[in-house]
Image (spheres, helix red, strand yellow):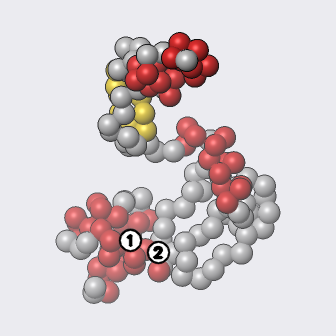
Amino acid sequence: MTEEQKDKIIRFRKQGFGYAEIGRKLDISKDTIKSFCRRNGLMISHEKYFDDKDKCRECGKPLVQQEKKKRRIFCSKVCREKWWTEHADKINRKAVYTFTCAGCGKSFTAYGNSKRKYCSHNCYITDRFGGGTADERETISG
């Protein structure tokens, strides 16, 4: 990668361009752009959600950042999971699918699973095994 390309990447990132867009403009792989940005601190941070970048987003505990590593925004797995559970609206969900339940016929959406058939486990059990609870099925068969 030439110095001119590096300067352009820095300029484009500061203007808010994404990796793929920069890659197309400079005819460089998106992954190469991403690696260069990570090594040079040009990652798009989550500052739009949280202002203090040196404290845990959930509990406020000070964070220790490591050089040439992805910026930490949570102090632990527990804090990360809690924050994302409470802020599910901030997740950029691209793989949301819409289905009609094979059990009840209602329309539902599911994230990440393009082959889903039922809106709930209860609909699956009802449709697959003829309905009722396990106790009801046991008294019928036994």
Q: Give amino acid for label 2.
A: Arg
Does residue 108 lie above or below 78 as drawn? above
The front one of 99 and 121 is: 121
The front one of 47 and 59 is: 59
Residue at 63% x, 80% y is 66
The residue most toward the front is: 142
Residue at 34% x, 80% y is 6
Q: Secondary structure at mark 2?
A: helix
Residue position marked by numbered label 1 in the rendering: 34
Q: Secondary structure at mark 1?
A: helix
Mark 2 and mark 1: span between their CA atoms? Answer: 6 Å
Q: Which mark is residue 38?
A: 2
Please provide percent x and percent y for residue 10. 40, 73
* Residues marked 2 and 1 touching at CB (< 8 Å): yes
Does residue 2 lie above or below 36 as drawn? below
| Corner quadrant of residue 85 | top right
Whether residue 108 is visible: no
